[in-house]
Amino acid sequence: MMEDMGVISTDDREIKLFYNGDTNKGQQTFAYLKSSKKDVLNIDLSKTKVTATQWAKLAQLLDKPIKELVNSEHPTFIEEYGKNPDIKNDDDWLKILEINPKVLTQPILVNGEQAMQIDTPSEIMTFLEETMES
């Protein structure tokens, strides 16, 4: 049974990690984050439903267009939408993330109003240092 998280709160004391627990990168990123002293709310996209509104908020926090959160090279994406889909509208990209969250490009960390996509798990340390200073 999937849980719905409601609105994404922006609490400075808590770090949220949106990741796919089925991937090595997701698992490593979560392990790195657990070693920090912050409270961590892990949102494993393979178990927890994230709504279109929440995806839109994440894109806003990252200051990125929604389509940049989607890995269009992911096998699931290609299987569902083809190699060169004609998707122009943000609502359609949001539906893709809502239906197939595993096509998220990289894990996303949120701390307060700051967010970043994690390309390599060690980037978490940089993010944590920056949020500790602010």
Image: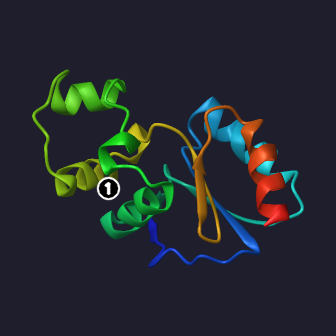
Amino acid carrying label 1: it is Glu
Find residue 100 and report its horizontal and vertical position in percent.
33, 45
* Residue situated furthest front in the rendering: 134
Quarter-of-image position of residue 29:
top right
**Residue 99 point in image, percent of width and height:** 29, 51
The quadrant the C terminus occupies is bottom right
Most extreme residue toward the left, as rendered? Answer: 86
Q: How is the image coloured?
A: rainbow
Given residues 123 and 40, the one toward you in this image is: 123
The quadrant where residue 67 appears: top left
> Is residue 23 toward the left or the right of residue 125 in the image?
left
Query: Residue at image x 13%, y 44%?
Result: 88
Q: Is residue 53 above or below residue 17?
A: below
In this figure, which residue is indicated by the disc labeled 1? Answer: 98
Residue at 81%, 45% (x, y): give it.
Answer: 125
State the residue in front, 46 or 5: 5
Residue 69 in the image: state x and y as whole percent.
Answer: 40, 44
The answer, for residue 29, to whether it is visible in the render is yes
Spot occupied by residue 17 in the image (x, y as percentages of width and height): 63, 56
Give the answer, above or below, for where 2 lies relative to 17: below
Residue, x 51% and y 74% (percent of image)? Answer: 8
Question: At x 14% / y 40%, what residue is drawn?
Answer: 87
Q: Is residue 50 visible?
A: no
For residue 107, which quarter of the picture? top right
